[in-house]
């Protein structure tokens, strides 16, 4: 049904194109790309990561030879549904505001006996070794909240502080290009090349911006979590590298997540 | 060892639609790494799907098929609860076999 | 171990500062942000930690963005005056180079990330934000369209006295856009060494040469 | 799969060695011979490898997007309405080795297959279908764009 609508749009755009200028060629391009994305929806390879994560979730691993089934992502031990759309949040046991990925490390440490420092080191080598397992588990955990709306808690003082810090980091211009997150994501309706840029200072809509990650990247065949997404944003901003699970990355996630209140999470998405 | 496939098989009317995702790097053998060295080819060459021991699709691929390959096809003659088995073999001789029950 | 300890210690700082006052002020949050920034990044490749240091222009414009208030006129003029002083004019007095190389530079978004080699050539990133020629339909819209840039400004001979004003204005915009607009989003291409003088001349030609496809 | 020593010896050359060493099976050796079309570098040679020229037919549909945002993953499908379709070939004209995939369609399986392929640049996608032992084809162009540096 949807597909045929897209195809009709493509035909209409192509018909309009005859003898028209660059602006209309742009519209046809946008419609063509919408059609391409639609065709990729069926059979998102993120499912492979989710499957792997599901298996790892119930597998006895680590020095304590235990599973992750009692891991508490904020909704109680083992409760996955709805956990992701309320993260990052404050955790009393660690005294930190944590995102899903740093919380997973806490669980792997406390339940399975891994050393957190080893896991942070592994996570820095994204997609390789133990990081591949953590990415898969993350995909499994987020998928349990597919279709739910973001509702990050802001009741705790530390959660509010992280929001304020995230906001300041979002607008912080620096580096040789003077880029900040806001350079590209501060207003509505702009593009880099043909790539539309969501305005992340507010709710950009269901399944857009913060609500579109984690996602499978077709360009490199990787599943990108929010930590990886932010890492690569900073790379392109020409900044030094944000450490995995650092407070800067979590503060930014709080800022974007709170701004995305009531946006539907379409995890795991598929992106170019 | 290769990660498992994601297979879905759904019966609608008399036709079963099978959709398969395979976890594979699908390296063409013509790409170079950062240092300019050729990255060796590593891709799935042969895929076969069977239903009740009968072949329902065979396909041969080059390295041009995308990473983490997707395959979709339709066949007749199956009933709900039947099994569909998919096997791939890559150019290094690694293989993987997974099955799914038709829903 | 070191990395993990650092992360933890910053968290403690956040916790303590947040605990001091029932409702922290904006200045408190600025201070915590600065601590978080220091503890959260590491140098990688050519991307050193010095890149986190903001000059006055970046510090003041970022603060204005956080507050959601534009800069007051006096501060804006101060930033512009300071940035105008950084302009270096072409040593040989010639402003235009080769538009063909300018087009290549405009297409390239490479350079200066931690994954780029320090010795590799930088691109100008122009098409990421601007339309320039009719032929390139994959252009961004963060900056204004520069299609027919010279033509629309009546430049028929970039070397003529009549074109001088537009040519010099364009040079300043490329060298250091903050000289004319305190909080412009445009990278300070010359000032920050993204492109050298010869490359900026080539981009100038792309924009101003009547033979450039940008002016067709 | 069960190779007797005798059948292995029937195969000549390098494949025989591989088979006798147990590295590949007889059926794989057979398939490897059939794979020659995958290494040719031009559209003409690819067509030759699969049996020569194919007549254009409106009974065949190439399903691929008009524009692909990323050439690394481009959905491509082929639907044939020709009776007795037994084989479907997918050829990406501008790729270094154009032949990308071959599908063998037994009785009872629909001549309607989909996969995803890499495209180095904008190109024609050519579907060749073998039906009743004859070759037929259809063409569709897909443009490959670069999406930019964000995303």
Image (spheres, coloured by chain):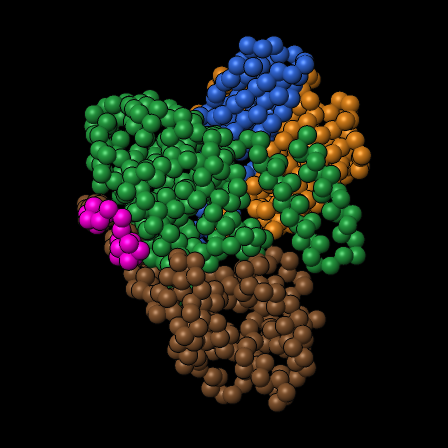
Letter of the chain in blue: B
User: What secondary structure characterizes most of the magenta part?
Assistant: helix
Which residue corresponds to the image point at 63% horizontal and 87% vertical from the top-left? C162
| B15 to D117, vertically: above or below | above
On the question of residue A138 being in view, the answer is: yes
Verify whether residue C26 appears in magenta: yes
Letter of the chain in green: A
Which residue corresponds to the image point at 30% horizontal and 33% vertical from the top-left? A104
Task: Provide residue C165's location: percent of width, then percent of height.
Answer: 58, 84
The hue used for chain D is orange
Left or right of D21 on screen, residue B48: right
- The N terminus of chain A sits in image quarter: top right
On the question of residue A228 being in view, the answer is: no
Quadrant of the rendered structure where residue C107 is? bottom right
Task: Provide residue D143's location: percent of width, then percent of height.
Answer: 66, 48
| D65 to C179, vertically: above or below | above
Task: Provide residue D82's location: percent of width, then percent of height.
Answer: 78, 26
Q: Which residues are magenta?
A: C16-32
Which residue corresponds to the image point at 39% horizontal and 46% vertical from the top-left? A255
Which residue corresponds to the image point at 38% horizontal and 40% vertical from the top-left? A127
The hue used for chain C is brown
Q: Residue furthest bottom?
A: C161
Quadrant of the rendered structure where residue A83 is? top left
């Amino acid at each position: 049904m949807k597909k045929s609508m897209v195809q009709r749009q493509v035909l209409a755009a192509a018909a309009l194109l005859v003898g028209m200028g660059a602006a209309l060629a742009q519209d046809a391009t946008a419609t063509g790309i919408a059609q391409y994305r639609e065709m990729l929806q069926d059979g998102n390879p993120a499912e492979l990561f989710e499957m792997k994560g599901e298996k790892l979730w119930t597998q006895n691993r680590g020095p304590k030879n235990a599973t992750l089934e009692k891991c508490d992502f904020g909704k109680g031990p083992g409760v996955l549904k709805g956990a992701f759309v309320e993260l990052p949040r404050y955790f009393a046991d660690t005294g930190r505001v944590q995102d899903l990925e740093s919380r997973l490390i806490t669980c792997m440490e406390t339940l399975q006996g891994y050393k957190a420092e080893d896991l942070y080191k592994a996570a820095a080598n994204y997609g390789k070794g133990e990081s591949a397992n953590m990415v898969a588990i993350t995909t499994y955990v987020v998928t349990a909240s597919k279709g739910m709306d973001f509702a990050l808690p802001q009741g705790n003082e530390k959660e509010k502080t992280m929001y304020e810090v995230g906001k300041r980091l979002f607008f912080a211009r620096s580096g040789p290009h003077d880029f900040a997150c806001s350079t590209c994501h501060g207003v509505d309706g702009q593009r880099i090349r043909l790539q539309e840029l969501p305005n992340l200072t507010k709710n950009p809509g269901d399944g857009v911006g913060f609500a579109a990650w984690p996602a499978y990247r077709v360009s490199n065949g990787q599943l990108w979590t929010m930590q990886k997404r932010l890492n690569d944003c900073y790379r392109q901003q020409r900044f030094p590298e944000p450490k995995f699970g650092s407070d800067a990355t979590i503060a930014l996630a709080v800022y974007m997540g709170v701004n995305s209140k009531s946006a539907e999470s379409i995890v795991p998405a598929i992106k170019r | 060892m290769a990660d498992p496939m994601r297979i879905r098989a759904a019966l609608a009317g008399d036709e079963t639609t099978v959709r398969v995702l395979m976890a594979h790097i699908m390296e063409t053998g013509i790409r170079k790494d950062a240092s300019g060295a050729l990255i060796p080819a590593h891709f799935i060459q042969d895929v076969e799907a069977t239903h009740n021991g009968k072949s329902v699709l065979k396909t041969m691929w080059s390295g041009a098929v995308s990473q983490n390959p997707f395959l979709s096809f339709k066949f007749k003659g199956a009933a709900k609860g039947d099994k569909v088995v998919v096997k791939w073999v890559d150019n290094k001789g690694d293989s993987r076999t997974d099955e799914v029950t038709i829903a | 171990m070191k990395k993990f300890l650092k992360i933890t210690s910053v968290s403690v700082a956040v916790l303590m500062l947040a605990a001091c006052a029932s409702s922290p002020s904006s200045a408190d949050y600025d201070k915590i942000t600065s601590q978080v920034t220091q503890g959260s990044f590491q140098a990688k490749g050519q991307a050193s930690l010095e890149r986190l240091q903001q000059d006055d222009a970046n510090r003041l414009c970022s603060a204005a963005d956080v507050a959601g208030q534009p800069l007051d006129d006096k501060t804006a003029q101060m930033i512009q005056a300071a940035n105008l002083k950084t302009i270096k004019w072409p040593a040989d007095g010639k402003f235009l180079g080769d538009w063909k190389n300018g087009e290549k530079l405009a297409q390239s978004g490479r350079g200066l990330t931690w994954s780029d080699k320090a010795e590799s050539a930088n691109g100008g990133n122009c098409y990421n934000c601007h339309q320039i020629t009719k032929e390139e339909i994959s252009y961004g819209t963060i900056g204004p369209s520069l299609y027919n840039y010279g033509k629309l400004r009546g430049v028929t001979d970039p070397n003529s006295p009549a074109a001088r004003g537009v040519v010099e204005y364009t040079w300043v915009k490329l060298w250091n856009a903050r000289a004319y607009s305190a909080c412009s989003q445009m990278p300070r291409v010359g000032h920050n060494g993204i492109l050298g003088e010869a490359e900026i001349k080539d981009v100038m030609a792309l924009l101003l040469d009547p033979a450039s496809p940008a002016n067709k | 799969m069960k190779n007797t020593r005798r059948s292995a010896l029937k195969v000549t050359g390098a494949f025989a060695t591989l088979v006798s060493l147990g590295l590949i099976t007889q059926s794989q050796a057979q398939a490897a011979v059939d794979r020659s079309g995958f290494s040719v570098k031009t559209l003409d040679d690819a067509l030759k490898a699969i049996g020569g020229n194919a007549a254009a037919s409106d009974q065949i549909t190439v399903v691929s997007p008009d524009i692909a945002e990323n050439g690394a993953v481009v959905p491509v499908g082929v639907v044939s309405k020709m009776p007795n379709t037994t084989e479907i070939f997918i050829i990406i004209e501008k790729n270094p080795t154009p032949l990308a995939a071959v599908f063998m369609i037994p009785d009872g399986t629909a001549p309607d297959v989909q996969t995803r392929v890499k495209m180095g640049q904008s190109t024609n996608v050519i579907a060749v279908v073998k039906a009743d032992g004859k070759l037929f084809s259809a063409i569709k162009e897909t443009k490959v764009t670069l999406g930019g540096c964000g995303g």
